[in-house]
C-alpha cells in the first residue's frame, strides 16, 4: 500500500486556470448567493447576537462565532459512462461572525476572499451596522485572485489548504465598513478528490489552538464522514474534546468540537504552544477496505483518542517495512541502499571493522543529505542506516519515539508524530543533517520516551516492544563559550574585537549552519567515509572544468562570507561593525573535531562614551543583546519552556590602553542563582588586562509557571548587566 | 520533510557536474560573443553579476484609435538586450511590463552557443504585478530567468510592444539595473508626426544625440556608453531627479489633411485630464443629506469645511481599483460614498463635490508627488500621479488630500509640498504650488526632568509633536490594534531605548487631529546610571537613533531623500542631591549648514544641569556632493551625544 501525497494534485489543476485576474462574471452572482442561502436559514443561536461581553471592549475585534462543518462522502454513483466509487466529495460550510472594534480590525477585514470554483460553491456576507441596519455585501465588484497562494489561509477551504492551488478564488472589498460594525459571512464549497486506485488517503493532521488572534466566543468544528472514513482526535491542556453526535444522515458519523469564550493568549517568550496551551488535534482517514495495514486508525464510527503501545509499534513496523519501496527522488529507497552498499564495497567496506563501517555508513548518508534540497524523514534515514548495517550483519534496533514538543508516546495520534531512531549496542543514531555526527543528540528528542520494536512474529503476530528513554543532555553538555579579546582603538571610539566561540551539544546544532555557511565544507566531505576524490577518473577537460567551478565557488564564498558575518554581528549588537576576519578552528563535523569553534575579528562602534577625559566602555555589552521582559510580560499564565538546558559563558579580556587606569570592575559583580538558572558576573584585573567572566545557565528545559519570578530575576540580571560600563581614567 | 539550507547554486552545480558530468561539459563549451569585455567589466564592476553588452530600443509610429475611439498615435517598440555574465553561474531576470495600454506582442529569449544565438523560449512567465497597496489593476509582467554558466556567457532578449495610445509612452531612462556598455534609444519619426524628446538630467552625462532625415522620416538616435548599474538604495533621491532620461512628447499629427492634437501645451494635458474626470458620471443628489448632517450645528464656514474634510479622511478607506482607463477616470461620487472606499481620484472627487454641495469653491486637481520632479509646464502624463481637491476659501487656497488621514485642515503632507497643482475649473485651469513648510513647523519637542536619588534616576518626560510629526503619529497610532496602542505610547517616551521604562502615560486628546500631540509619563532611568568608585555617570541625551541609518558608506551611489523636514528640540534636566555636584560636562556644540543644523549646550545651576539641544533637518535632500559635510555633521552630533555627565560628591 502506498501513501497518497495530496500535494501532487495541484499539478492537475494549474493548467486549467491560467487566466488573467479579471472581474467576476455577473452570471454566477445569482448562483453563488443562492447556494449560500440555506446556511443563513440554519438555526444558529450562537450567531444571533451582535453584542460581545464588556470584558472584551478593549480588544481590537471579537469573534462572535466561527463554525466549520466538513462532510466527506465517498460517491458511488455508477452512471452510464462513469465508473462507480471514484471520488471523495467534500462539502464545507463555514459561518463566521466578528465584531470590529477599531480601525485596525476594519483594515484587517476590508477585503474578503471567497471561492467560486464549482457550480455548487456559495458565499454571501452581511454587515450589521450599529444603528440596526443590515446590508448584504455586493459581490459584483469582486475580482479574481490570480494565485490562490495569496489567499489568506483563514479564507481557504479545508480542502484547498490540503490540496493546494487550483480552485478559483475571488476577493471583494467590503463596502461601508467602520469600527463598531459586525461582519458575518457564510460559505459553502464542494470539492472532489479522485481516489481511484488509492486504498487509503490520510488527510493532513489538524492542530487547532483554542486561542486566536482575537477573543472568540464560539468556535465549533463538525466533521461528518460516511462509513468509508475513520476519525481520531485528542485534546490537550484543558481544551474541550471532540464529541460524537447523531448525524441527520443516518449513514454518516458526526464528530463535534465546541469551545466557548476563549480569550487571547498574552505570553510571548518561552512558549511551547502545543505543550502549554489548550488545543485539539484531529485527522480524517479514508480507507476503501476493512483491513488497513500500517495506518493508525480506530474502528469505524469511533473517535479514536489514543493508541496503545502495541498499536503504535505494529503500525510503525508495518510502515517501516515498506520504506524500501518508497521513492526518494527518481529511485526507491532500497535502490539507494543497494547502490551505496556497492559503492562502500568498492571502498573496502568488507574489510572495515564494525566501528569503522558504522561511522563510514553514517557519513556516506550524511554526504547524500548535503546535496539534497530536503532532509530525509526519520523513517527513511533509519531504514537506510539500518539496511546498510544489515549488509554487514551488524544488528541494530529500531526505536520509535515522539518529539518532546508533542509530549509522550501516549500523546501520539498521527503517523507523522512517530519519530524513528536507530540503536546499535549502547549508541543511538539519529537522522542526518548537513553537519551531524554519529551519536549526536537531537533537540526535539532529548529525554523522549521510546520503544524498541521488532518485527512481529509471523505465526503469532506477537511483537517485542521494550521501553527505552532516549538520552537527555544537561546544561553542561550544551555549552556555548565565548572568549573575547577587546582593545580600544587609537580613535578612542572603536573597539577591536576578536571573539572565539566554542559550541557543544545542542548549542552546536543551533549554530553550526550559520558558521559553515559560505564555507566549502561539502567539497572534502567524501573523506569522512573514505570516499574517492571526485576528480579520480575524470578526463583532463572534465577535471579542468571541475577545478574552475571550485575556484569560482571559493571566490564567490570569499565575497559572501564577510558580508554574512558582518550582517550577523550587526544584528547581534545593533551597532555598526567593520568585518576583519573569520576563521574556523574546529568545524564540529567529525568525531575527531566534535566541537564547533570559530573566531570572528571585527571592529565595533558605539560601545564607548565619554565623561570629560574619562571614557566609559560598555565591556559587558560584548555579550550581545540580552532578552528583556517588558511590563506586559511580567506576569505569567503558562508554563515555561526554554527548549533545552544550556550553559553559556563569556570570558572577556579587555586590554587597558596605555595612559589609562581602569575602574568599575567590582560594580559588575553579580550572582543570581535559583531553580531556573544562574547568572553570575565576576571581574578581575591583572597585568593591564581586565577580565570579565559571565556565566548564564538555564538549568532545565521546562519549568512551572510558578517559577516565573525566578526567571525574571535571572533574565533581568543578565539584561541589566549588559548595559554597565567600566571606567578608563587618564593617568595624567 | 523539512526544508534545509540550500547549499547554493555553485555547490549544487558541482554536484550536478559529478552526477551528470557530460551535461556540464557541454555547457562548458558555450562560447562568448566578447569574453574579453566581460572579463574587463567583471574587474570594473565587482558587485555586479551580469552586464548589458548592448541595449537597443527602436520606436516607430503609426496611426490608430484608442479604446475611447479617438484617433491617436500608435507606437511600436522593437528592442533587443544582449546580456553577458560577469561571474560564473550568475543569473538574473529580464522583465517586460505591460497593461491595457501596452501590448506585449513578441518576447523571445536566445542563448549564445557556438557562434550564434539560438532561440530557447518565445513566451515568458506571466504574472500580475499589482502592488500590495492596490486592490486591483491591470499591470502585468512577463519575464525570463537568464542563466550564465561562465564569464562572458551571453543571452539575448528581443521584445516587441505596442503602445495603443502614444500618450502612455512617457519616459525612457538610460540606466538599467546592470552595467551597460552601450545603450541606444532610437525613434523613427514620420513627417506627419510632430514629437519632442525632452532631455532630462542630461548634464554631466555623455549622451550622443544624432538626427538624420531620410525618405519621409527623421531618425533620432540617443547613445550612451559605459553606464554603471542603477541600484536601489535606502531613501535614494528619486531617479527622475538624478538620472538622465527622455520624456516623449507627442505634440500633434496629421491625419487625412487634419492636424490632430497631442500634448503640445499644458492646456492639452488639462483637456485630456478634464475629459476623463468628467467621465466619472457623478450623481451629487445622494450626497446632500450626508453633507447636511455632517455640517449640522456648525455655524462657521471653516468648521463646516473641516467637518467635511475630516469625514472623508475618517470614513473613506483607501482601496485602489485601476483597470485601463479606470486608472485615470475617478470613481463616481455616489460609488465612493456608498462603498466608503476609493483611491485618490475617488476621494478627491467626493471631497470636491461634498464641499461644493455645502457651498464652497472646491475643484478637482491633479498633482505629481515629490517623486516626480516635473513642472506642470511639461505637457506629459508623467507629470501627475495623484489627485486632490483644491479649495478657495477666505482669500486663501487650500489643498485637501482625502488619502492623507489625520492631516489637519490647512496643512499638507510633505510628499506634495512645493509641487504644482493643476486645478480644474471647467474649460480653464489654474496652476498653483502647494506651500512648503519649514523644520520649525514639524517639531518633536521633548521636555524631561529627572532627579537622582540614591543611585536611582526617575523623572517625568513630556513629548510634543507638531506639524507632520503630529500627523505621522496619528497615522501610526490610530491604525494600531487598540491592544497595542498603550505599548506604542510607551515606546514613544522610551525613545526606542530598551533601557528606559515608561509608566503612568497620559496624552492630549488624541481624537482631535488639530491639537499638538502631547504624551507624558514617568520614566525610570535607573538602569542607565553607572556608579563607579562612588561617582555616578549618567546620560540624559537621547540621540535620535534613526539618523544612524543616514550615514552613507563608501558604496553609496546617490544622495538621500529624507522625505521630511523636521526639528528635534530637547530640554532635559537632572537634579542631584545637594551634597553632589556635576563635573566634566560636555563642551557646547553648534553647527550650522544650509540644509541642517545642530545646537547643544549643558548649563549647570546649583545642583541642576539642563541640556538644551536642537537638531533641524531643513532640507530633505542630502546630495552626494554634500556627503563629507553630512558625515562630519552626524559624527559630531553622535560625539556630543556620547558624553555622560559625571556626578561626584562635594
Image: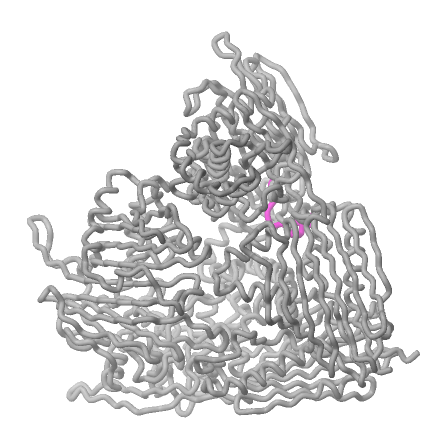
The answer to which quarter of the image holds residue A236 is: bottom left
User: x, y percentage for residue B348?
Assistant: 50, 36
Q: Is residue A289 magenta?
A: no
The quarter of the rendered structure image containing the C terminus of chain B is: bottom right
User: x, y percentage for residue A642?
Assistant: 49, 81
Camera-nearest residue between A546 and A285: A285
Q: Does the rendering let one see residue B48?
A: yes
Q: Does the rendering let one see residue B245?
A: no
In this rendering, the answer to whether A203 lies above or below A482 is above
Q: Is residue B48 magenta?
A: yes
* Residue at x-position 25% and y-position 90%: A464
Camera-nearest residue between B620 and A580: B620
Camera-nearest residue between B208 and A146: A146
Specify start and end residues of the magenta stretch as a single range: B42-52
* Residue at x-position 78% and y-position 60%: B613
Compared across the picture, whether B443 is left or right of A510 comes to right
User: x, y percentage for residue B209?
Assistant: 68, 25
User: x, y percentage for residue B423?
Assistant: 57, 29
Compared across the picture, whether B42 is left or right of A640 comes to right
In this rendering, the answer to whether B447 lies above or below A296 is above
Amino acid at each position: 500500500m502506498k501513501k497518497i501525497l495530496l500535494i501532487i494534485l495541484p499539478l492537475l489543476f494549474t493548467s486549467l486556470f491560467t487566466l488573467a485576474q479579471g472581474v467576476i462574471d455577473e452570471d454566477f452572482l445569482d448562483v453563488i448567493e443562492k447556494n449560500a442561502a440555506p446556511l443563513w436559514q440554519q438555526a444558529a443561536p450562537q450567531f444571533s447576537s451582535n453584542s460581545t461581553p464588556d470584558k472584551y471592549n478593549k480588544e481590537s475585534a471579537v469573534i462572535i462565532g466561527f463554525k466549520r462543518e466538513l462532510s466527506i462522502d465517498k460517491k458511488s454513483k455508477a452512471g452510464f459512462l462513469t465508473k462507480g466509487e471514484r471520488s471523495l466529495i467534500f462539502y464545507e460550510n463555514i459561518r463566521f461572525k466578528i465584531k470590529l472594534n477599531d480601525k485596525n480590525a476594519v483594515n484587517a477585514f476590508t477585503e474578503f476572499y471567497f471561492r467560486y470554483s464549482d457550480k455548487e460553491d456559495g458565499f454571501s456576507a452581511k454587515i450589521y451596522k450599529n444603528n440596526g441596519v443590515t446590508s448584504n455585501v455586493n459581490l459584483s465588484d469582486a475580482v479574481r485572485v490570480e494565485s490562490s497562494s495569496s489567499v489568506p489561509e483563514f479564507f481557504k477551504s479545508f480542502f484547498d489548504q490540503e490540496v493546494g492551488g487550483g480552485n478559483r478564488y475571488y476577493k471583494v472589498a467590503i463596502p461601508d465598513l467602520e469600527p463598531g460594525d459586525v461582519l458575518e459571512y457564510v460559505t459553502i464549497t464542494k470539492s472532489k478528490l479522485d481516489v481511484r486506485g488509492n486504498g487509503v488517503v490520510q488527510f493532513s493532521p489538524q492542530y487547532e489552538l483554542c486561542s486566536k488572534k482575537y477573543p472568540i466566543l464560539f468556535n465549533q468544528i463538525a466533521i461528518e464522514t460516511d462509513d468509508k472514513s475513520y476519525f481520531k482526535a485528542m485534546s490537550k491542556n484543558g481544551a474541550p474534546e471532540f464529541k460524537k453526535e447523531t448525524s441527520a444522515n443516518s449513514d454518516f458519523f458526526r464528530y463535534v468540537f465546541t469551545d466557548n469564550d476563549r480569550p487571547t493568549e498574552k505570553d510571548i517568550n518561552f512558549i511551547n504552544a502545543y505543550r502549554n496551551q489548550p488545543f485539539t488535534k484531529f485527522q480524517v482517514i479514508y480507507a476503501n477496505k476493512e483491513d488497513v495495514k500500517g495506518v493508525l486508525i480506530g474502528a469505524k464510527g469511533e473517535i479514536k483518542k489514543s493508541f496503545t503501545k502495541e498499536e503504535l509499534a505494529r503500525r510503525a513496523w508495518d510502515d517501516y517495512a515498506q520504506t524500501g519501496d518508497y521513492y526518494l527522488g527518481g529511485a526507491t529507497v532500497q535502490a539507494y541502499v543497494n547502490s551505496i552498499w556497492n559503492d562502500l564495497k568498492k571502498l573496502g567496506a568488507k574489510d572495515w571493522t564494525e566501528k569503522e563501517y558504522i561511522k563510514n555508513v553514517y557519513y556516506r548518508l550524511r554526504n547524500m543529505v548535503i546535496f539534497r534540497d530536503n532532509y530525509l524523514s526519520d523513517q527513511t534515514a533509519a531504514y537506510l542506516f539500518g539496511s546498510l548495517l544489515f549488509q554487514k550483519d551488524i544488528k541494530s534496533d529500531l526505536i520509535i519515539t515522539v518529539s518532546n514538543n508533542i509530549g509522550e508516546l501516549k500523546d501520539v495520534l498521527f503517523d507523522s508524530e512517530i519519530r524513528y531512531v536507530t540503536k546499535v549496542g549502547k549508541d543511538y543514531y539519529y537522522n542526518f543533517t548537513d553537519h551531524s555526527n554519529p551519536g549526536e543528540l537531537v533537540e526535539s528528542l532529548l529525554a523522549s520516551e521510546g520503544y524498541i520494536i521488532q518485527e512481529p512474529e509471523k505465526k503469532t503476530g506477537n511483537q517485542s516492544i521494550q521501553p527505552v528513554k532516549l538520552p537527555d543532555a544537561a546544561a553542561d553538555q550544551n555549552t556555548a563559550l565565548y572568549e573575547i579579546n577587546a582593545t580600544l582603538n587609537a580613535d578612542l571610539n572603536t573597539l577591536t574585537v576578536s571573539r572565539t566561540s566554542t559550541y557543544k551539544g545542542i548549542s552546536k546544532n543551533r549554530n553550526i549552519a550559520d558558521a559553515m555557511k559560505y564555507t566549502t565544507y561539502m567539497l572534502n566531505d567524501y573523506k569522512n567515509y573514505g570516499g574517492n576524490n571526485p576528480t579520480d577518473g575524470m578526463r583532463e577537460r572534465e577535471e579542468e572544468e571541475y577545478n574552475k567551478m571550485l575556484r569560482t565557488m571559493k571566490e564567490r564564498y570569499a565575497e559572501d562570507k564577510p558580508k554574512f558575518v558582518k550582517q550577523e554581528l550587526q544584528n547581534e549588537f545593533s551597532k555598526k561593525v567593520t568585518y576583519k576576519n573569520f576563521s574556523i578552528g574546529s568545524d564540529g563535523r567529525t568525531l575527531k573535531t566534535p566541537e564547533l569553534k570559530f573566531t570572528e575579528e571585527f571592529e565595533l562602534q558605539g560601545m564607548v562614551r565619554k565623561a570629560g577625559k574619562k571614557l566609559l566602555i560598555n565591556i559587558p555589552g560584548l555579550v550581545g543583546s540580552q532578552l528583556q521582559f517588558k511590563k506586559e510580560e511580567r506576569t505569567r499564565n503558562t508554563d515555561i519552556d526554554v527548549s533545552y538546558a544550556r550553559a553559556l559563558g563569556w570570558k572577556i579580556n579587555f586590554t587597558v590602553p596605555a595612559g589609562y587606569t581602569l575602574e568599575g570592575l567590582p560594580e559588575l559583580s553579580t550572582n543570581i542563582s535559583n531553580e531556573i538558572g544562574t547568572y553570575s558576573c565576576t571581574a578581575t584585573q591583572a597585568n593591564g588586562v581586565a577580565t570579565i567572566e559571565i556565566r548564564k545557565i538555564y538549568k532545565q528545559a521546562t519549568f512551572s509557571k510558578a517559577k516565573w519570578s525566578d526567571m525574571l530575576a535571572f533574565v533581568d540580571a543578565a539584561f541589566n548587566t549588559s548595559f554597565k560600563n567600566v571606567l578608563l581614567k587618564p593617568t595624567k | 520533510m523539512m526544508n534545509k539550507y540550500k547549499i547554493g547554486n555553485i555547490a549544487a552545480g558541482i554536484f550536478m557536474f559529478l552526477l551528470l558530468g557530460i551535461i556540464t561539459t557541454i555547457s562548458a563549451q558555450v562560447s562568448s560573443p566578447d569574453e574579453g569585455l566581460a572579463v574587463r567589466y567583471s574587474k570594473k564592476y565587482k558587485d555586479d553579476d551580469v552586464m548589458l553588452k548592448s541595449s537597443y530600443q527602436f520606436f516607430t509610429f503609426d496611426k490608430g484609435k484608442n479604446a475611447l475611439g479617438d484617433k491617436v498615435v500608435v507606437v511600436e517598440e522593437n528592442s533587443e538586450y544582449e546580456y553577458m555574465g560577469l561571474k560564473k553561474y550568475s543569473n538574473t531576470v529580464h522583465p517586460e511590463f505591460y497593461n491595457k495600454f501596452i501590448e506585449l506582442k513578441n518576447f523571445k529569449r536566445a542563448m549564445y552557443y557556438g557562434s550564434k544565438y539560438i532561440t530557447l523560449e518565445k513566451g515568458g512567465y506571466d504574472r500580475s504585478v499589482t502592488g500590495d497597496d492596490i486592490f486591483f489593476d491591470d499591470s502585468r509582467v512577463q519575464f525570463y530567468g537568464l542563466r550564465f554558466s561562465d564569464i562572458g556567457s551571453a543571452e539575448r532578449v528581443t521584445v516587441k510592444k505596442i503602445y495603443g495610445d502614444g500618450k502612455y509612452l512617457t519616459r525612457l531612462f538610460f540606466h538599467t539595473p546592470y552595467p551597460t556598455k552601450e545603450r541606444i534609444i532610437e525613434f523613427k519619426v514620420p513627417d506627419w508626426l510632430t514629437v519632442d524628446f525632452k532631455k532630462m538630467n542630461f548634464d554631466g552625462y555623455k549622451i550622443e544625440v544624432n538626427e538624420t532625415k531620410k525618405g519621409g522620416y527623421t531618425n533620432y538616435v540617443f547613445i550612451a556608453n559605459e553606464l554603471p548599474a542603477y541600484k536601489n538604495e535606502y531613501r535614494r533621491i528619486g531617479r527622475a531627479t538624478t538620472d538622465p532620461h527622455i520624456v516623449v512628447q507627442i505634440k500633434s499629427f496629421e491625419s487625412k489633411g487634419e492636424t490632430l492634437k497631442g500634448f503640445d501645451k499644458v492646456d492639452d494635458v488639462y483637456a485630456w485630464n478634464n475629459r476623463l474626470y468628467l467621465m466619472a458620471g457623478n450623481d451629487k443628489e445622494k450626497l446632500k443629506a450626508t453633507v447636511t448632517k455632517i455640517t449640522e450645528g456648525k455655524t462657521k464656514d471653516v468648521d463646516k469645511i473641516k467637518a467635511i474634510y475630516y469625514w472623508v479622511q475618517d470614513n473613506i478607506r483607501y482601496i485602489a481599483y485601476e483597470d485601463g482607463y479606470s486608472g485615470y477616470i475617478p470613481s463616481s461620487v455616489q460609488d465612493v460614498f456608498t462603498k466608503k472606499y476609493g483611491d485618490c481620484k475617488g476621494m478627491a472627487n467626493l471631497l470636491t463635490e461634498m464641499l461644493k454641495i455645502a457651498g464652497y469653491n472646491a475643484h478637482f486637481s491633479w498633482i505629481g508627488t515629490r517623486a516626480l520632479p516635473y513642472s506642470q509646464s511639461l505637457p506629459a502624463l508623467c507629470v501627475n500621479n495623484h489627485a486632490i481637491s483644491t479649495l478657495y476659501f477666505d482669500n486663501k487656497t487650500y489643498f485637501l488630500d482625502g488619502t492623507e488621514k489625520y492631516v489637519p485642515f490647512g496643512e499638507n503632507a510633505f510628499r506634495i509640498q512645493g509641487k504644482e497643482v493643476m486645478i480644474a475649473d471647467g474649460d480653464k485651469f489654474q496652476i498653483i504650488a502647494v506651500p512648503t513648510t519649514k523644520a520649525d513647523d514639524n517639531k518633536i519637542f521633548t521636555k524631561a526632568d529627572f532627579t537622582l536619588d540614591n543611585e536611582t534616576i526617575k523623572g517625568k518626560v513630556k513629548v510634543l509633536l507638531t506639524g507632520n510629526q503630529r500627523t505621522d503619529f496619528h497615522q501610526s497610532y490610530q491604525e494600531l490594534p487598540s491592544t497595542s496602542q498603550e505599548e506604542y505610547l510607551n515606546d514613544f517616551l522610551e525613545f526606542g531605548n530598551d533601557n528606559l521604562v515608561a509608566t503612568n502615560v497620559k496624552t492630549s486628546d488624541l481624537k482631535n487631529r488639530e491639537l499638538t500631540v502631547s504624551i507624558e509619563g514617568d520614566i525610570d532611568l535607573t538602569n542607565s546610571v553607572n556608579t563607579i568608585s562612588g561617582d555616578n555617570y549618567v546620560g540624559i541625551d537621547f540621540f535620535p537613533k534613526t539618523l544612524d541609518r543616514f550615514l552613507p558608506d563608501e558604496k553609496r551611489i546617490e544622495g538621500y531623500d529624507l522625505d521630511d523636514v523636521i526639528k528635534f528640540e530637547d530640554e532635559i534636566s537632572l537634579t542631584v542631591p545637594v551634597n553632589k555636584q556635576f563635573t566634566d560636562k560636555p563642551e557646547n556644540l553648534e553647527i550650522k549648514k544650509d540644509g541642517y543644523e545642530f545646537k547643544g549646550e549643558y548649563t549647570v545651576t546649583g545642583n541642576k544641569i539642563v541640556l538644551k539641544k536642537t537638531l533641524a533637518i531643513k532640507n530633505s535632500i542630502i546630495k552626494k556632493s554634500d556627503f563629507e559635510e553630512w558625515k562630519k555633521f552626524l559624527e559630531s552630533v553622535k560625539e556630543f551625544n556620547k558624553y555622560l555627565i559625571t556626578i561626584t560628591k562635594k
